[in-house]
Image: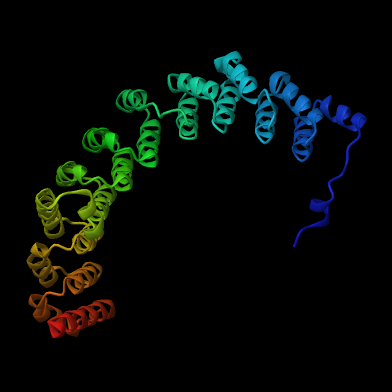
Amino acid sequence: MTNNSDKHQVQLSNNELQTLLESNMREKRIQVIHYLVQTTSSQSVDILSKLALSDPDPLVREFAIIGLSNFQFEEYIEFFAKIYRSYIEEKRAVKVRAIWALGKRDSLLAFNVLMKGLRDENIEIQYWSIQGLLKQTTPFPFKEIEELLFSNKSHLIRQTITWALGIVKDKNTVKILIDALIKDKNAHVRMNAAWALRNIKDPVSISGLCYALNNEVNELTKRQIVITIGIILDRSKAQIAQNADELVNIRKEAISALSQRIQRDNCYYVRRTCAEALGRIGDKQAVSILIQTYASDVNKFVRREIANALGIFGDERALPVLRKSLRSHYKQVVKAAKTAIERIESNSGKN
């Protein structure tokens, strides 16, 4: 239900507006900004522009910039580019907000200012410059972004870059992301790199992913790497991307890496994710490892996921261990085993 006060905004006269604008109280001037944003007049743009440029309070200028970003006025790009170039570092919050506003519009001038923002020493400006570049139709600056990824000391910026590359989904960035996945010292950056590779879905990245999985120490990052391998090598998708011989070698490397991890990793959700990934890949050379692990792993979540994978494969070799697990105390394991047995027996009956 909408409140009546939301439907009918109180109209302010020019005198009332002027009184509020001349107030020494920040809250009064911000009140004007909220009021002007609800209108569509050229007067609103004029007042907000003056506040954005000359109000003595940086917070009021920020609010004015946010308000102006909702308007479609002709000088939009030039106006915010001017603010970014004009304000000194001690008023960086205003510069940050100007870059943010520029990133909401697509133009060559906005692109050029955002590119300058990449080289700014302020982390917030770099962050919003990267975000803004994603919205431009001008080709994404991969070279500059790569240089920033491997030179910037801020893990926030490196995280943002790896995330952005996952949004762009350009296969030419696979090597960059693999390098970040293997070499970056921050686990969140590495995790984002794995996520980006998942979005790109290029089987060429599997070798690098397997290498990273064997050397990764962070459990959440390992989990993301495993998920990425499984998604990339999902049976239907990978067959479209690669020829048969190349795909066999890629799958073999992936299954080897996942098999080692499902048997040796101390973290149950990494092992569980490995079982899911092996089921996604769908290559029967994984069946023996899954059966062996199912018989030895004591974690109910891992065993449930392995049972699901064995059901997908439909291989009769799994029936003995699945039937044995029907005596398990864990209902989830019993339910998964029953479903897997039914699928395997159904497949065998058809044959």
The reply to whether residue 185 is in sight is no
Q: State the residue at coordinates (18%, 56%).
A: 266
Q: Quadrant of residue 202?
A: top left
Q: Quadrant of residue 259?
A: bottom left
- Relative side of 280 to 53, left or right: left
Please, is residue 321 above or below residue 224 in the view?
below
Residue 322, image x and y in percent? 15, 79
Which color scheme is applied? rainbow
* Depth check, front residue: 221 or 45: 45
Residue 325, image x and y in percent? 16, 80
- Relative side of 102 to 210, left or right: right
- Relative side of 12 to 338, left or right: right
How many marks overall? 0
The reply to whether residue 253 is in sight is yes
In which quadrant will I find the N terminus?
bottom right
Residue 104, image x and y in percent? 57, 33
In which quadrant will I find the C terminus?
bottom left
Residue 213, image x and y in percent? 18, 47
